[in-house]
Image (spheres, rainbow, N blue to C red):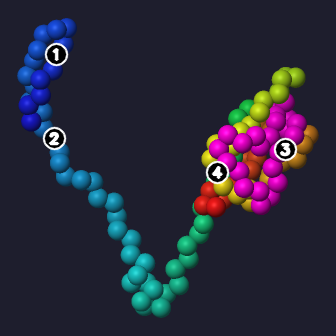
Amino acid sequence: MKLKVTVNQIPYEVEVEVDDTPEMLPIISIGDALERGKVVEVKKVLSKIESPLAGSVRRLFVEVDQIIVPGQLIAVLEAMKMETEMKAPFSGKITKIFVEPGDAVQGGDPMFEVDPEV
């Protein structure tokens, strides 16, 4: 394939090779296993919402089984006498809460487990 490229207002014609073959992902067939009477277990994937910083949990605004939406206030953290609002990054249902008000957290600590498929 030939392309026309302009660098510093000087046009150049460039020939490039393009690989048109699509990359294939491995094919996993569970139909065969089911036909042969084997049990196939499918696990639901849950997501975790982690603390964005080190501090202490000041307030929680959600509870287990509550549906959340992106941007919803879910907690307030306190660090160095400053409060930081935590907002939901995605929608789903809260399935587990790992912290309570007053708990110390580090950046990256899991705070909530969410089922995003709700």
Mark 2 closeness class: few <14, some 14–19, many ≥20 residues within 10 Å: few
The residue to which callout 3 is attached is 60
Marks 3 and 1 in Cβ contact (< 8 Å): no
Q: Whole-Å distance between the Cαs marked 4 and 2?
A: 40 Å
Quadrant, the C terminus: bottom right
Q: Which residues are magenta?
A: 54-78
Q: Earlier in the sequence, mark 4 or mark 3?
A: 3
Q: Nearer the viewer, mark 2 or mark 3?
A: 3
Task: Please name the amino acid that badge 1 sits on.
Answer: Thr
Q: Earlier in the sequence, mark 1 or mark 4?
A: 1
Q: Looking at the rendered structure, which numbered label has been put on residue 6? A: 1
Pointer 4 or 2: first along the chain: 2
Which residue type does callout 4 highlight? Ser
**Where is residue 19, by image quadrant?**
top left
Q: Secondary structure at mark 3?
A: strand
Q: Is residue 115 above or below residue 62?
A: below
Quadrant in the picture for the N terminus: top left
Q: Nearer the viewer, mark 4 or mark 2?
A: 4
Q: Toward which corner of the image does residue 116 lie, by quadrant?
A: bottom right
Q: Which residue is mark 4?
A: 91
Mark 3 neighbour density, 10 Å: few (under 14) some (14–19) many (20 or more): some
